[in-house]
Structure formats: C-alpha cells, structure tokens
Amino acid sequence: MRVALDAMGGDHAPVEQVKGALIAAQEFGVEVLLVGPPDLLEAELAKHPRNSRVSIVPSLETIQMGEEEIVKAVRSHPEASVNVAMGLVKDGRADAAVSAGNSGAVAASAFFMLGRVPGVERPALGTLIPFNSGKLFVLDLGANADCRPSHMAQFGVMGSAFMEEVGGVVNPRVGLLNMGEEDGKGNDLTAESFDKLRETPGINFVGNVEGVEIHKNVCDVLVTDGFTGNVALKVGEGIADYILQEVRATIKSSILFLAAAVLLKPALKRSLKSLNYEEYGGANLLGINGVVLIAHGRSDAVAFKNALRVADLASGSHLMEKMRATFAEAKASSAAGR
C-alpha cells in the first residue's frame, strides 16, 4: 500500500514525519509519499539511511494550525500539503492519507477532495484504544459537536464495519456511551439514539455502556456524539499523562523503588505502553470516500509510524468496499420502503 503523509502538518514538522516514515517503511514495508517542500524534505532525509520505499511529492504551501477560517484556507491553498496528499488518494496514486495538521483543515480537505461515501450523512472520527481486555473503537471523537440520532446510528454502522474489516472482529458488539446501562437513560439524544441503533439492521447493538465500564470488554464499538467523545478523549489523555507522571515521580522518590524499577522495567514498560497516545496512531475519518487518518498535532516519530501502520491496514482491507456496499444497501432499502 502507498500512503501519502502530509509532512508539513503538526507541531514537529517535518522532522518527526520523516523519521516516522522511514521507520514504517523499514518495519512494515509501507510505501510512503512525503508531501511537502522538496528541499526541506531532502535535507531531513539526508540525516538518515535512505529507504527506497520513501519518496517525495512536491508541495510548496501549508495551512497553519491557528487558521481561523478553515474552509477558506483549504479552498484558497490548492497546493497546500494536505490538499496535495488528498489529491494523491483521489487520483489513485496513494491508497490512504495521513496528516497531523489542523484537524478541521484535514477534514475539510478530505471532504472537498474525496467527498462522502454515498448515503453517509456525517463523517466521524474514530480510533482504536487498546485496553488490556481487548480493543475498543470509539467514535465520534470530535468531527460533529452536534448530532442527530440518525448520525449516531450511522456511526454504529461505520464503527462496526471498521472493527470487522480492520480489527478482525466477527459480528462486533456496538454500545452507546451513556450515563447508565438501563434503557431510556440519558438525554433526548441518547434516548432516541438508543432506539435508532436498536432498529438499525446489520449491527450487533448491545445497549448503553457507562464510562466506567468501557475498558472491561463489554463492547467492540462505542458510539457517542462528537462533543462528548472529544471531551472524554482529552480527559482520558490527561489522566493517562497524570498516571505516567505519578509513576515516574514515585519511582524516583526512593533508592529502593529505583532498584526495584530496574528489575520491573520490562513489565512497567509493557504495562504503561497503552497509556501513550503515540500507540493509537491517529483517528480514522470514516464516511469519507477514501482512507484518511488524522494524527495528534504533537505526534512524534512513533505516532506517525503507527498512523502509517493503521492507514496501511485499513487501505489493504475491504473497509471501503464494505462501507460503500452497506450504505448503498441501506439507501436502496429506504427507497423501497417509501
């Protein structure tokens, strides 16, 4: 698979993108198209052993992280690195695109360049969270602050398709994030979304899931609106960061703890690994007519490596075929029922 990587999006561009691309090419055999200013990228590549799977696609414009009028910025910079990356997917020169740029700009570029899968009302951001008891795919994580029940039902369909085709889960369980497990709990949106998800054919809806239960392997896909999902994600990142800081501070507080940490280092490293956002790779923008990943703005080489890995897996699966077929069938069924 060939993945277009926006080398100019993110806090550490293009240094970490180049490193991540080279690692992904070496470890996973991914062919990476680095999109950005050739001179700048050549200078970064010269610092590392060259890999023939990593090449450069020229782009001389960028969209800044702090842009206020996102849509205008995307439209007025056709040669911006994120637009060029999406164009490579549209033209079939790349199988997926990855960017850590302004998330609104990446989503707008994907929408304008690739369009939506026919039948999809709203694209959604989702990511795999590797809990100890299993892998959980959560969506929406911020693409839609305001949602309707029909959007939430479609998120369930998209998340289910992702876990089946990319996650390898047969008949994935779909849960709805709510303040209680009982039917009818929550606000108007969650109550109506519950009914809509229960009525949606083709998904294995298991009901409401409380936040305190999501790490216990009670579902494979967790559906929520973008506002709630984004807040939950950032609170989770903050807690994970706090735990990591506390563990490090506690170990350093005693010579005995330091000695014990030397012996326990492999176990601690493996246990704490899942708390690092770098391991998630990025959020999948589902509902777009192509594979697109939005990485964290502060992504380092490890995060980009994993984002490229996930993009490679998704584009090499039957995800897009399943999404198109599922929504085409739903549209035909709806038309027949009128």
Image (cartoon, rainbow, N blue to C red):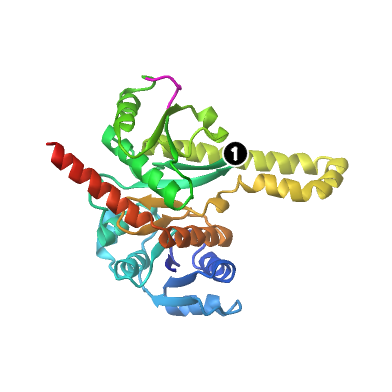
Seen at 46% across and 47% down, the residue is 127
Q: Is residue 33 visible?
A: yes
Q: What residue appears at the point 76 percent right and 39 percent down from the top-left corner?
A: 250
- Give x and y (percent) for residue 90: 29, 66
Residue 305: quarter of image: bottom right
- Is residue 181 magenta-colored? yes
* Quadrant of the image containing the N terminus: bottom left
**Which residues are the magenta region?**
178-183
**Residue 328 appears left or right of 40:** left
Total marks placed: 1
Location of residue 287 in the rendering, given as x and y in whole percent from the top left corner = 31, 50
User: Which residue is found at the position 31% from the left and 23% from the top?
Assistant: 188
The quadrant the C terminus occupies is: top left
Q: What's the residue type where badge 1 is placed?
A: Ser
Residue 156 lies in the magenta-colored region: no
Q: Based on the displayed image, in which of its 4 quarters is residue 171 positioned?
A: top left
Q: Residue 258 location in percent, x, y?
A: 83, 45
The residue labelled by disc 1 is 133
In the depicted structure, whether residue 82 falls above or below residue 120: below
**Front-lying residue, 45 or 163:** 163
Quadrant of residue 150 within the rendered picture? top left
Q: Is residue 69 visible?
A: no
Q: Is residue 274 above or below residue 61?
A: above
Q: Residue furthest left?
A: 338
Badge 1 density bin: few <14, some 14–19, many ≥20, Cα 10 Å = few
Magenta span dominant secondary structure: loop
Image position of 201 with respect to 300: above or below:
above
Under circle 1, the secondary element is loop
Position of residue 213 measured from the top left corner of the image (x, y, whole percent): 53, 29
